[in-house]
Image (cartoon, helix red, strand yellow):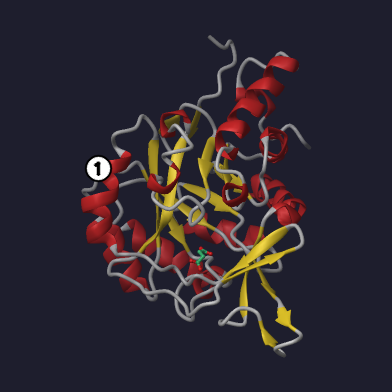
């Protein structure tokens, strides 16, 4: 039995440890069940759910890059009704918290999905105003403070679960959007979503992704993500779930020292399905090594 206390609280929801998954990199958890004991995770954050099914973007929608990958999936998902019927019962078999990433093309669609999920047995909602791969909704709401505040305040009218707002790094000053989301009623923030990027097939003389531009994620973006978590933690009073290139316990500790309450592991799941568990073990090992009794003792210690 470990002497290290890793529990964290996000908007009143207690997680047994600070590690969750980044939306879109872990499906609904089912895909990883063979490798990962979901009971060990602080929370599972599922792929974006809309009020109705979305078919996503044309292929190719994934490309490898140095130190990461590009995606332009376009939030393909089977819709809230399917999710409520199939995925929630599956996840509820496990002793972990459920965070549901929600998406929409319009404020009305965001409100509809929040309303559909309002009586569902889930713990937290994560409002996706940061996906760079859709022409309406997503990043179009997350790059303008007034729009961000408006969508958050409207969704808050329908959401019964605490609301995390997921921020895009594709802005000049992330603290402006963070403050706007908090003014709108965000109970917590998660950051960062992907950085907009591109690759070109020089032989075919065309972009590698059918959508031309996609979202860049993976270890290469970690310094950017860490900087933004650090700046945001200094600017707001709500808890932060930090993410962006986390691949092990040491990466996670960096985010916690920068001010994150919890962390999400994303792209690393694709190359190492065990990475969430290894990250939890790595945090525990670090705490043992430095005799840290509670994870909150190191939260935000970087001035
Ligand atoms: C996608 O489905 O295009 C990625 C999800 C996101 O960036 O939020």
Q: Quadrant of the C terminus?
A: top right
At mark 1, the secondary structure is helix
Residue 236 in view (yes/no): no
Q: Is residue 62 left or right of residue 87?
A: right
Q: Is residue 220 above or below residue 6?
A: below
Residue 71 in view (yes/no): yes
Which is more toward the observer, 86 or 147?
A: 86
Q: Is residue 104 above or below residue 180?
A: below
Residue sitting at x 59%, y 30%: 280
Q: Residues within 10 Å of mark 1 (few under 14, many from 20)?
A: few
Q: Could you say which quadrant of the image residue 156 lies in?
A: bottom left
The number of callouts visible is: 1
Q: Is residue 50 left or right of residue 197?
A: left
Q: Residue 151: x, y in percent?
A: 42, 67
Which is more toward the observer, 182 or 75?
A: 75
Q: Is residue 50 left or right of residue 26?
A: left
Q: Residue 77: x, y in percent?
A: 36, 65
Q: Could you say which quadrant of the image residue 258 lies in?
A: top right
Spot the residue most to the front: 203
Residue sitting at x 39%, y 50%: 28
Residue sitting at x 54%, y 71%: 139
Q: Residue 42: x, y in percent?
A: 47, 33
Q: Is residue 192 left or right of residue 228?
A: left
Q: Residue 289: x, y in percent?
A: 74, 16
Residue sitting at x 37%, y 74%: 55
Q: Is residue 178 above or below residue 70?
A: above
The residue tagged 1 is 89
């Amino acid at each position: 039995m470990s002497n290290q206390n890793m529990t964290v609280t996000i908007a009143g929801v207690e997680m047994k440890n600070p590690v969750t998954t980044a939306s879109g990199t872990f499906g609904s958890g089912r895909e990883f069940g063979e490798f990962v004991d979901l009971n060990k995770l602080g929370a599972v954050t599922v792929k974006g759910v809309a009020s109705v099914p979305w078919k996503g973007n044309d292929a190719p929608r994934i490309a490898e890059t140095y130190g990461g990958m590009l995606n332009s999936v376009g939030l393909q998902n089977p819709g809230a009704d399917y999710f409520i019927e199939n995925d929630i019962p599956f996840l509820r078999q496990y002793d972990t918290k459920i965070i549901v990433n929600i998406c929409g093309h319009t404020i009305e669609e965001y409100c509809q999905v929040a309303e559909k999920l309002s009586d569902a047995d889930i713990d937290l909602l994560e409002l996706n105003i940061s996906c760079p791969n859709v022409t309406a909704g997503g990043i179009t709401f997350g790059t303008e403070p007034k729009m961000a505040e408006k969508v958050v305040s409207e969704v808050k009218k329908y959401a019964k679960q605490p609301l995390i707002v997921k921020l895009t790094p594709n802005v000049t000053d992330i603290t402006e959007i963070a403050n706007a989301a908090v003014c709108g009623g965000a109970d917590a923030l998660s950051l960062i979503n992907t950085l907009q990027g591109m690759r070109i097939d020089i032989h075919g003389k065309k972009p590698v992704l059918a959508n031309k531009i996609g979202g860049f994620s993976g270890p290469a973006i970690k310094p950017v993500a860490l900087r933004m978590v650090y700046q945001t933690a200094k600017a707001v009073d709500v808890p932060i779930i930090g993410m962006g290139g986390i691949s092990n316990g040491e990466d996670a500790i960096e985010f916690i020292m920068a001010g994150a309450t919890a962390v999400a592991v994303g792209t690393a799941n694709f190359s190492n399905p065990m990475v969430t568990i290894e990250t939890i073990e790595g945090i525990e090992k670090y705490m043992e090594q430095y005799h840290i009794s509670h994870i909150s003792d190191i939260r935000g210690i970087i001035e």
